[in-house]
Every structure is written in structure tokens, then in C-alpha cells.
Image: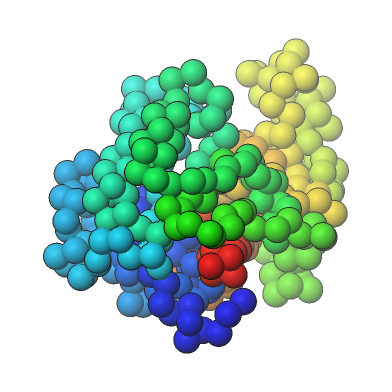
Amino acid sequence: MKEVSETKKYKAIDFFCGGGGMTCGLRQAGIDVIAGVDLDENAKETYEYNNPGSVFVHRDIKRLHSNYFEKKFGVQKNDDRLIMVGCSPCQYYSIINTDHSKAELSKDLLMNFARFIEYYMPGYVLVENVPGIVTNKETILPKFLRKIEKMGYKHTEEIVDMSQYGVPQSRRRFSLVATRLENIDISLPEKSKEIITVADVLGENNGFSKIKAGHKDNSEFQHTVAGLSEVSLKRMALTPHNGGNRLSWASQPDLQLKCYVGKNDIFKDNYGRMWWNRPSPTITTKFFSISNGRFAHPDEDRAISIREGATLQSFPKDYVFKTNSIAGAARIIGNAVPCEYARRLGETIISNS
């Protein structure tokens, strides 16, 4: 990696920034993130508190004038060291989408992002999304790629698993890096030689004290965890440590859920425990709930905490989530681009320039 004095010359605008996962990682790489843009006002305080100097722009990209950043921040056109990031909401292309009509609103956001690329012609473009943006029959991706190719951009793309890039989590995502600069080698970050597991980042040895379901941590560490009903506590007590699942109590009528009766071959991750010796499953916006996936602690009878979920998303331990609820914090964390992957993207751009 080059000296910080050189990397400071790189600037970025983070569209669909949420609580700042991508911004945090790019800043760790030494890139000056001028602003983050998002329609979710609930993410503003978290974003600006943790990324001082990066301005949260609470705007709908569809209604934001192309010259906004030029007028507001003095962003210049054709800046070879400007990076534009577009990690648009992925509900339309997600395999876990349940509200198609609501998700329809996110379908064309990538083309709105392209409008800003065309206006500013930045040196680099980054895009991250769910794999469905490639496989969905109605995907807007080919149209987006044709548009930036006509602008003179070349690109590289891949479906990556974040566990291969220093993130302690199995998280498959579409990743794209594009540039209009000639004689520049564009590439995604190199894969790590070693995989980081849950045991490498969680547990008492890593600063996470043992807690019970319903524990509330009022400190900025936010080792807060959702409560469990009496019946769910009984289920947890019977779920084997380190990777156990709901099949261990499926034969007990007082514990088995009606929706799973006779369906032992589906949704086996729900109410399941994580494994110590593997990366965690994908951290979603519902990771605080054991009924929504394999989000139970490997040993303790509870879901993982807010801080544990953030750590599995590679947020720094001093990153504070400024929300009034567990669900609000989990939404910011689950929607984020893992900071470590973002850092590696930024460092790769710098090293290839």
C-alpha cells in the first residue's frame, strides 16, 4: 500500500451508503470519502458519528440533481482519482425477498447511479450487490454495463464469497470494479490464504463476555441481545452446541413449530447454532432472531448480539450504531458492505494505479 499522503488524493462518493460499511473500509484504505448518499434518514447519525468528515446526504437519488456534488462539494468532472460507489438496495434481486411490490422500487436504482457516472466521469466505479443481479431474468445489470461501456469504461466482475477476503462470514456478493483509465490493471482484491472463523473473532478470548438472552448493554460496545420466550429457551437448551439445529427437538410436540411438522428437510438453519470452526452464515438484517436463520450463539442459549453481528460484518469494535432498537441496529449492520472487503477494494485500486 502506498503512503497515506498519496492515498489522500483519492476521493469517493458512496451512493446507497446506509450506516457506512463501505465508507468505513475505504477510509481505512486512506481514501477521502466526501459524502454518502442514502434515503434512510435513520442511518444518518450512525454514518456521520463513525465517519467524521464524510457528509451524509439524505436524498432520493432519483430526485438528486447530477450537479449536486459539483456545487455542494466542489467535485470536478473527469477526476482520475475520484471513485463512485453504487451498492444499491438489493431487495428486488434477493433470494429472501418477500415483498415484491416494495422491492420493485429498488430494481432500477443502478441506472440512476449511472447518471452520476456519466456526468462526472470518475476514474473508478465500484458496484456491490447480491448474486441475483446477475441471474434474475429481469436484471438491469446488462443495460448498466452497456451504458458504462459506451462511456469508455472497462470492468472486471465476479461473484465473490466474503469469507475469502478476510471477513469471518460466508457472504456471496456480486462485485464489480470499472475504470475509464488506460494502462491501468483493474482487478478485484486477492483472495486470502486463510479463512477466518467465528472462533477467531467471537467468544471470551476476543472480548465477548458470556451473556443471557435479553441482556442489554448500555455501553457503546453494544453487546446487547434479543430476549427469548420460555419455549424458545427450552429449544435452545436442547440444541447441541457448535452447529446444532432444530431437528434435535423436532419430535417433541410441545417444542416443535406447527409450520415445520413433517418438514425436517427444509429451513434447517432456522433456530440453528453457528459453528466455532467455520465462518458465520450470511449476516442478514434479522440476525438478532434465531427463528430467521442460523443465528444462535455456538454455545450460549441466545441469538448473537448486536456487537457480535457487527464483528462478523468486520465493523471495528468501536463502531457505534446510533439507533433506539435492536432491530434498527441489525438493519444497518445486515445491509452493510463488510468493511474489510471495502478496505481491500480501496487498497487494490490504489496499488494498481
Residue 317 visible here: yes
Q: Nearer the viewer, residue 235 or 68?
A: 68
Q: Is residue 199 left or right of residue 155?
A: right
| Quarter the N terminus occupies | bottom right
Question: What's the colour scheme?
Answer: rainbow
Vertical position of residue 17 compared to residue 150: above or below? below
Tell me which corner region of the image, top left, top right, bottom left or bottom right, holds residue 156: top right
- Rendered position, 169 above or below 97: below
> Where in the figure is residue 134, as x and y percent of width and height?
54, 30
Q: Compared to 5, does 243 lie above or below?
A: above
Query: Could you say which quadrant of the image residue 18 lies in?
Result: bottom left
Give the left or right position of residue 278, taking residue 106 as reference.
Answer: right
Residue sitting at x 20%, y 70%? 74
* Residue at position x 70%, y 58% in the image: 190
Determine the residue located farthest toward the top in the rendered image. 262
Residue shown at the point (78%, 73%) measured from the top left? 205
- Residue 136: percent from the left, percent from the top? 51, 23
Q: Which sits in the foreground, 77 or 338?
A: 77
Q: In this picture, is 179 found above or below 131? A: below
- Position of residue 142 in the picture relative to residue 44 (left or right): right
Q: Position of residue 335 (x, y in %)?
A: 48, 48
Image position, residue 341 (x, y; %): 60, 59
The residue depicted at 75 percent of the width and 48 percent of the height is: 274
Q: Is residue 20 visible?
A: no
Total number of numbered discs in the rendering: 0
Nearer to me, 340 or 76: 76
Foreground of the two, 307 or 148: 148
On the rendered structure, is 352 left or right of 66? right
